Structures are given as structure tokens and as C-alpha cells.
Amino acid sequence: MAQNWKQLEKDFIAKIESAEDLNSIENIRIELLGKKGQISSLMTQMKDVPKEDKKEYGMAVNGLKQLTESLIAQKIETLKEKQMLRQLQDDRIDITLPANRGKYGTLHPLTVVQQEIEDIFIGMGYAVVEGPEVELDLYNFERANIPADHPSRDMQDTFYVDVNRLLRTQTTAIQMRVLEKEHDILPIKVVCPGKVYRKDDDDATHSHQFVQVEGLVVGENITLGDLKGSLELLARSMFGNSREIRLRQSYFPFTEPSLEVDVSCHICGGKGCPTCKYTGWIEILGSGMVHPRVLEMANIDSKKYSGFAFGVGVERVAMLKYGVDDIRHFYANNIRFLDTFKRFE
Ligand code: DAH
């Protein structure tokens, strides 16, 4: 049986060459080299070849098989490379295009102000101490020298959990915990930030939940002068270097004397404007010398030691600083409102 080997070889080469992708070369491989493929069938036909021609026939088929195998292997490599190039081309990234920066947030203005206040006092060697929001009546009121019949214990003002537990109404509760815990390792110098709760109706200046930062210093020879110096520094750091402070007599059960602190208006510099209600002064915090009874209740000798304390409303400071006219803006989570604080960071 005569075979035109040259022609067969040409046909095979042409076929392999024609493959355009990995799929088609696989089909061609099956067609030529598969079990039922052309080369297999040439092998089977060997039995009909006259004995004297078998050797030559066999060599020719084998030659053709080897050639086909190596050409197909080469072709597969070439096609793989082509495919990879095409993929790279398709996935190309133009690194010169402007980046899509995405949208990232900003610290909440109350967090910013709280951290600013903390930082001022950390710089003066104070430690930051937190406490539980669900607090014992003992620390929130009793130890703060707020007797059972005091108006601020009224159910109107306080969210009670049960008879002994409540949502703390003031971070003064943390001070009382610190006094108890550290009464024998004086001096104490702490700032106590945290959320507090009151049964208030929400309006532009009141919220049933707000944030306070309190400070407490107890040691030997702590005077009103120390208090004034610390508060002056606080006022200037928050509202500008040229601010003055003014102390007014006030009443808090846990301090004696008690003082309300005004800062000269940062908007008009003291001349009078709507923000300071034309007085030139803005009230920013409550403070005083720790009441001797509060020290005694914590087993601290009030003859030997004295202390001062103050409490700042974070929302109030933030409203004054950034000119926010409604406290409720801080809790509404309106992104457009919150975004405006990016420029302050
Ligand atoms: N606890 C007071 C309040 O919530 C604020 C305050 C006043 C705290 C005087 C103090 C202080 O530590 O000394 O209204």
C-alpha cells in the first residue's frame, strides 16, 4: 500500500499551523494522534503492508508521529504564550490615570474635642481613667455628697436601672471611684472622660445623652490658684492664646467653694456679640475645691490633703468652637455635617 508520506506530512503541518487557539490545537491533536486518530489508523494498516515493505512503512509512520507530536507541542507553547500576551493586554492598567481615592471618614467632632481636652491634661501629667456607664448610686451621688433628697437625684433627672443602679448622670462618678481606689497612693491627677445620661427633653441645647470630661487633682497643698492656672491653660488651648478666664461663685454638692468658669468670648474677643449674648464672656465649665466631706468619705485626711475638680461638657465646647447651633447635629450622623469637620483636623 503506497502512501504519499510527503503529502501526508504537508497536510499535517498545514493543519497544525492552522490552529488558532488552544481548543482547536487540542481537537487537531485528537484527530491526528488520538486513539482513533489518523496516525493510529496508519499503524493499524500496517498489517496489510507486504512484509518486505513493513520496515519502511513503520519508519515512515513513526517519523510522521514524532514530527506531529513535536509540532503540536511547539504549537501549544506558542498558543499559550499568545493567550498570555492577550490577557496581559486586556488586563492592562494605566497607572498614569488619576487614582480613585475612595471616600474615607473623619473622627467625630466630639471625639476630636474630647481627645484635645485629654491631650492638654496628659501633657501636664494627668492619667486618663474611664468608668462604667451603668453606675452605682453610691458613686454617682452618695460619695459625691449628694444627699438622698437632693433635686438632682429626682427621678426626673436620672435613668434608674433599679434602686441601686442608674445610668451615670455625671463623670463625677469616675472621680469617686478613683478617690476610693487611690486614697492611699496620693497625689491623684486624673481626667475622666465619658458619656453621661439625663432624663432631659432633647432640644437645641439639651440632650438625654452627652459627653463630659472631668478632672481631679488631690494632694498636699493643692490650692484654688492651681485650679485657676490649669483652667486658664485649658481655656487657652481650646479657644486661643489670648483668652482670659473669670471665676464666679456657684454651687455643687461635691465642691466647696464651687466655681463656674467663664472664658472671654473667642468670637468678639470680649466686646460683645450674639455668641456671648453681648456679655463678652461664655460659661464653659463647673469646678471647685473638693469638698472635705468627699475626701473623708474616701478615707482621705481632709486636714492634710486638698484637691480641685472640674467638669467640662464636650458638646458645649464643640458647639462654641465650631459655631454649631444645635446639639442634635452631633448625634444625627449626617455625613454632610460630619464632613465639614475634615478641615479642622
Ligand atoms: N458634675 C457637674 C455636672 O455634671 C460638673 C462638675 C462641676 C464637675 C464641678 C466637677 C466639678 O468635677 O468640680 O454638672
Image (spheres, rainbow, N blue to C red):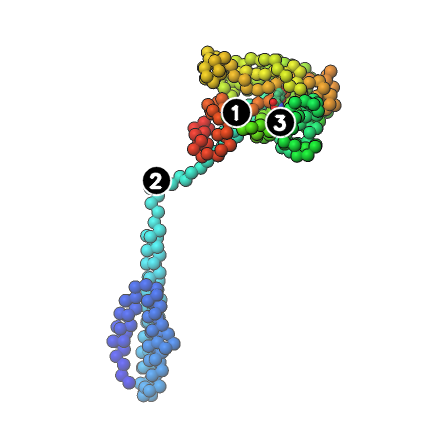
Label 2 element class: loop
Front in this rendered view, residue 123 or 199:
199
> Tags 3 and 2 in contact by the CB under 8 Å rule?
no
Residue shown at the point (51%, 14%) measured from the top left: 281
In the image, is 184 to the left or to the right of 55? Answer: right
Q: Assess mark 3: CB under 8 A from ligand 1?
A: no
Give me the C-alpha separation between circle 3 and circle 2.
55 Å
Q: Nearer the viewer, residue 230 or 125?
A: 230
- Quarter of the rendering containing residue 256: top right
Labels 2 & 1 near each other (Cβ < 8 A): no
Regarding residue 155, the answer to whether it shows in the image is yes
For label 1, the residue is: 205
Q: Nearer the viewer, residue 122 or 32?
A: 122
Separation of marks 2 and 1 at Cα, in angstroms? 44 Å
Q: Is residue 344 above or below residue 246?
A: below
Judged from the image, the quadrant occupied by ligand 1 is top right
Q: Is mark 1 within 8 Å of ligand 1?
A: no
Q: Are marks 3 and 1 in contact (CB under 8 Å)?
A: no
Q: Residues within 10 Å of mark 3 (few under 14, many from 20)?
A: some
The three-letter amino acid code for the residue at tag 3 is: Asp
Three-letter code, disc 2: Pro
Secondary structure at numbered mark 3: loop
Q: Residue at x 54, y 14 (%)?
A: 245
Q: Which residue is mark 2?
A: 98
